[in-house]
């Protein structure tokens, strides 16, 4: 059984004033809520069980799902109304809602893309985590070895790094490796899409983590002992519908996909 999780708990502060009265997940694009677009994409890709986490105006999301009969899917709600748990904490809390024998595709509710989710899920079967990445300009990159094993993270604007010991924080004399990663078009660095596949084999590693943490920080720790690999999509078309000025772009994206 294919299963997925949609991150829908965010406050959507960049979409104010719209999100002063509704959750980001229910902001409409092309006549339908963002949540609908992600649910339909997952349903078309053969995902049957979907966990949706909720926090901001949580009741509006649960009412929307109930009013639509969960769209014929096995939808389970992970309630974060007491505290927003970030991406890693959200996955950890939702653990009991998943089938322990199948990978979990993780998808943000505010992402529209041309990704073949079924193909990505298939590619992820042998990994402990599979991160969809691409060559695009950003300030923060994930770093990989030649065989696409995750090795670290870098902010090219500030020089901050995270990861194993060979990627220690920058000093006034950065290592040759760090220097090369700060230059444009490095083949070892890729931008994260926000779409990834998480194996339940990783849940035991989360036991010692606090309630609230980011999934990238978790992956940067897990990659020391587990298979955390990147998959590159060269023709990636992805839109983060996170700001008011992105809504018009989202309408065009939906119409042209």
Image (tube, rainbow, N blue to C red):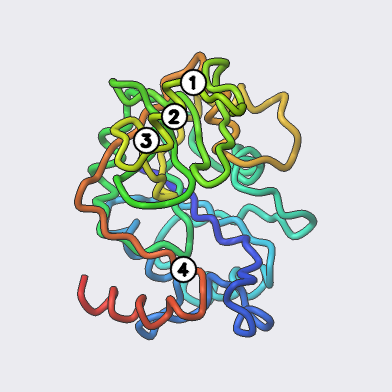
Which of 198/2 is in front? 198
Give the mark toward the camera: 3 or 1.
1
Query: Which residue position holds label 2?
Result: 179
- Look at the numbered disc 1 and give the secondary structure of its residue: loop
Residue 249: percent from the left, percent from the top? 35, 77
Q: Is residue 75 above or below residue 157?
A: below
Q: CA distance from mark 2 to mark 3?
A: 12 Å
Give the mark toward the camera: 4 or 2.
2
Q: CA distance from mark 3 to mark 4?
A: 30 Å
Q: Earlier in the sequence, mark 3 or mark 1?
A: 1
Neighbour tally class for label 2: few under 14, some 14-19, many 20 plus, Cα within 10 Å: few
Mark number for residue 189?
3
The quadrant the N terminus occupies is top left
Q: What residue do we see at 44% from left, 29% from top? A: 179
Residue 245: percent from the left, percent from the top? 46, 80
Give the mark toward the camera: 2 or 3.
2
Query: Which residue position holds label 4?
Result: 35
Which of 195/192 is in front? 192
Residue 15 shows up from this direction = yes
Q: CA distance from mark 3 to mark 1?
A: 16 Å
Q: CA distance from mark 1 to mark 2?
A: 6 Å
Mark number for residue 249?
none
Neighbour tally class for label 3: few under 14, some 14-19, many 20 plus, Cα within 10 Å: many
Q: Earlier in the sequence, mark 3 or mark 4?
A: 4
Q: What residue do we see at 54% from left, 75% from top? A: 64
Query: Which residue position holds label 1?
Result: 175
Q: What residue do we see at 52% from left, 42% from top? A: 155
């Amino acid at each position: 059984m294919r299963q997925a999780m949609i991150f829908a708990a965010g406050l959507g502060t960049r979409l104010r004033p719209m999100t002063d009265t509704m959750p980001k997940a229910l902001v409409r694009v092309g006549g339908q809520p963002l949540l609908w677009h992600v649910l339909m994409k997952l349903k078309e890709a053969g995902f049957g069980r979907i966990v949706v986490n909720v926090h901001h105006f949580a009741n509006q999301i649960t009412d929307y799902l109930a009013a639509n009969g969960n769209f014929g899917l096995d939808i389970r709600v992970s309630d974060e109304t007491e505290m927003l748990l970030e991406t890693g904490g959200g996955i950890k809390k939702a653990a009991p809602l998943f089938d322990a024998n199948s990978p979990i595709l993780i998808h943000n509710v505010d992402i529209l893309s041309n990704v073949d989710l079924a193909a990505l899920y298939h590619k992820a079967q042998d990994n402990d985590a599979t991160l969809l990445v691409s060559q695009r300009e950003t300030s923060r990159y994930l770093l990989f070895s030649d065989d696409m094993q995750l090795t670290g993270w870098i902010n090219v604007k500030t020089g901050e790094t995270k990861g194993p010991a060979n990627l220690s924080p920058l000093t006034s004399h950065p290592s040759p490796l760090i220097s090369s990663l700060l230059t444009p078009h490095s083949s070892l660095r890729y931008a994260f899409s926000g779409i990834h596949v998480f194996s339940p084999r990783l849940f035991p590693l989360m036991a010692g983590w606090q309630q609230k943490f980011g999934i990238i920080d978790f992956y940067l720790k897990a990659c020391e002992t587990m298979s955390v690999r990147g998959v590159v999509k060269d023709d990636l078309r992805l839109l983060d519908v996170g700001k008011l000025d992105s809504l018009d772009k989202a309408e065009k994206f939906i119409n042209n996909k």
